[in-house]
Amino acid sequence: MSAEPDEKPKLNLTLTHEGTSIQVKVKATMTFKKIFDAAEKKFGKDPGTLKFHYDGTRISAEDTPGSLGMEDGDQVDAFLEQVGGGSCRNSRLRSDSPSH
């Protein structure tokens, strides 16, 4: 009776951010939390500052390449999270205006 190696196939993924690409080799069962942490370190960003997307869909930390149906050679895009973006109102301008 011979034991078979319990080795899962690995995927090569490309992660891109602002024109820079890195290659990572991961198991299909690895959570993206580990991948995010490594990528943010490589891109020189603080943990939790990048948001990752695959085929236009945001990836959560609990997702795995296998759960997203990823294949060898797929690309993941990283973006800085944008906070806000609404119009800016300055109430001081109205209070400093002379009243009529």
Image: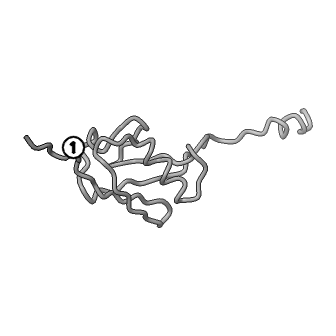
The front one of 89 and 56 is 56
**Residue drawn at point x = 59 percent, y = 54 percent:** 45
> Relative to 39, does residue 69 appear above or below in the rendering?
above
Left or right, 90 with reference to 25: right
Q: Quadrant of the C terminus?
A: top right
Q: Is residue 67 found left or right of 2 in the rendered image?
A: right
Dot 1 amino acid type: Asp
Q: Which residue is mark 1?
A: 6
Colouring rule applied to residues: one colour
Q: Residues within 10 Å of mark 1 (few under 14, many from 20)?
A: few
Is residue 21 toward the left or the right of residue 6 in the image?
right
Q: Quadrant of residue 57?
A: top left
* Position of residue 60 measured from the top left corner of the image (x, y, whole percent): 41, 37
* Quadrant occupied by the N terminus: top left
**Which structural element holds mark 1?**
loop
57 displayed left or right of 2: right
Residue at the limit of the structure toward the left, as seen here: 1
Residue 78 position, x and y percent, is 46, 53
Check the image and report above or below for 46 versus 99: below
Q: Residue at x 27, y 60 (%)?
A: 73
